[in-house]
Image (cartoon, rainbow, N blue to C red):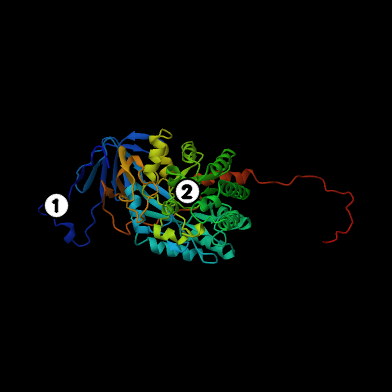
Amino acid sequence: MAQGNSYRKIVFMWSFDSGHVPPAIEDKAPMPKQRLLIKGGKVVNDDQSVEADVYVEDGIVQQVGPNLNLEPPTGLTVLDATDKLVIPGGIDTHTHMQFPFMGSKSKDDFYTGTKAAVAGGTTMIIDFAIPQKGSSLIEAFDLWKSWADPKVCCDYALHVAVTWWSNKVKEEMKSLAENKGVNSFKMFMAYKDVYMLNDEELYAAFSCCRELGAVAQVHAENGDLIAQNSKKLLSMGITGPEGHILSRPEEVEAEATQRAITIANAVNCPLFVVHVMSKSAARVLANARREGKVVYGETIAACLGTDGTNYWNKDWAHAAAHVMGPPLRPDPSTPDFLMNLLANADLSVTATDNCTFDICQKALGKDDFTKIPNGVNGVEDRMSVVWEKGVHSGKMDENRFVAVTSTNAAKIFNLYPKKGRIAVGSDADIVIWDPKATRTISAKTHHQANDFNIFEGMVCHGVCVATVSRGKVVYEGGVFNVTAGEGKYVSRPPFPPYVYKRVRQREKVCQPVPVKRAPYTGLVSTTPITPK
């Protein structure tokens, strides 16, 4: 890794007068404040960039301004960010750590996954608690939280999936929103007979989200068509990874995206479409936004950094390693197309859908592509991939980079301005980013638990050289200083203003009203209607 100017970190230890008893042996001695000063960098938020220092105390940003001089310097850690950018820590809105799925469990657990995240400049993930059909949403939430709390190396939150519908589900959604800090629920339109909801259930779930002030999320694919296509392909003897993409063409993603937007708009519910993977689906979403619909699109590092031509690779393991749902698209112009929409605000957020399975796990589907566990890596490499394909290529500037990797996510899920911004009062989740440094992505050097990296060999300009989580330097120059469980669960209040201001106003002014007219007084047919 080439990193331009190296860091300088100076730690001033506590000192005491000869007549002062050290706090360690005093009764009820106050804990020393954790103090951090980041000097000489350019602070980049989504709306502006300024040359400024950043002072942090006890995990909160206290001052942002030029040439900050703090006296006395006792207990102060100083990071030199000269010629570097100081940016809000990344927020990955879509991960699946230690996820039990398709007969296996994803390799990255909440420790290895979040440790890799901070190495890449991400300081918060939002994972998914996903109950089986007929199971309790609250129990799923509690189970995922019990997995995460002792392991996370950075902050996290949980979306909760709605995989079936009943009055019990509705009540549990209300309880999660009011008592557990959950303000987003995901509905699947794919994985028939496992997670998939029908249109009537989607209508009910979206309506409930609107009542609760939550953001509705969808995995948008037509599960019925996928099931039929898969049967047909298998009957033709197509069993390899290419069958995965052939069973899920762009049309099934675009159709489901249009259907989800239509249903959500009918109940005035804000919609967040996860992992927009194709040009067709992206166009549907972009058109809906331009028509004024309250819908947001998330695209992921995988479809910005590679494409679906890999499914035809002669090496079965290589092809299978890229299997995810929705699939990567074989049209090689897709990554550029999606990046352009991201740069121009037709798409809002970047994530990863990080759900890693090693080659042995993928081999569960060696004779049947429908049994290959779906998922790829990305949580460590997202920031560098987006910088390389977005900023270094000239498609977006540094401020838009911050918006799509952090700030927009914080706004949509009601974390802003505690997260997603460097300002007085914000959480000190900060990354020092070297835009001139380069690194080469490889499974040999990444920190994830998987044995394959879909970005293998990609040279990325833009490198995270230090990560600060809650005011603590947890990663610097390739060295970790973090312990499992140091991250915290973050509650998210309902009705995020960024999303719901328009929704509420529309309810005031866009309600249908009956037409006032004189009653009809003419003849009424008396012909009986015979049931068929």
Distance of label 2 from label 1 (alpha carbons): 68 Å
Place of residue 523 in the rendered image (x, y in percent of width and height, measured from the top left):
90, 51
Residue 485 occupies quadrant: bottom left
Q: Secondary structure at mark 2?
A: helix
Per the rendering, the mark at residue 281 is none
Q: Is residue 123 above or below residue 372?
A: above
In this picture, residue 524 sits left or right of residue 110: right
Q: Is residue 379 above or below residue 289?
A: below
Please state which amino acid type lies under the numbered disc 2.
Trp
- Label 1 sits on residue: 16
Please state which amino acid type lies under the numbered disc 1.
Phe
Query: Between residues 8 and 274, which one lies in front from this camera angle?
Result: 274
Q: Which residue lies at the image location 55% right of the left edge and 52% below the top edge?
A: 247
- Quadrant holding the C terminus: bottom right
- Label 2 sits on residue: 312
Query: Between residues 374 and 412, which one lies in front from this camera angle?
Result: 374
Query: Between residues 428 and 293, which one lies in front from this camera angle?
Result: 293
Q: Is residue 366 visible?
A: yes
Label whose residue precedes the other's in the sequence (2 or 1): 1
Say whether marks 2 and 1 touch (CB < 8 Å).
Answer: no
Q: Residues within 10 Å of mark 1 (few under 14, many from 20)?
A: few
Place of residue 331 in the rendered image (x, y in percent of width and height, measured from the top left):
50, 41
Place of residue 203 in the rendered image (x, y in percent of width and height, measured from the top left):
61, 55
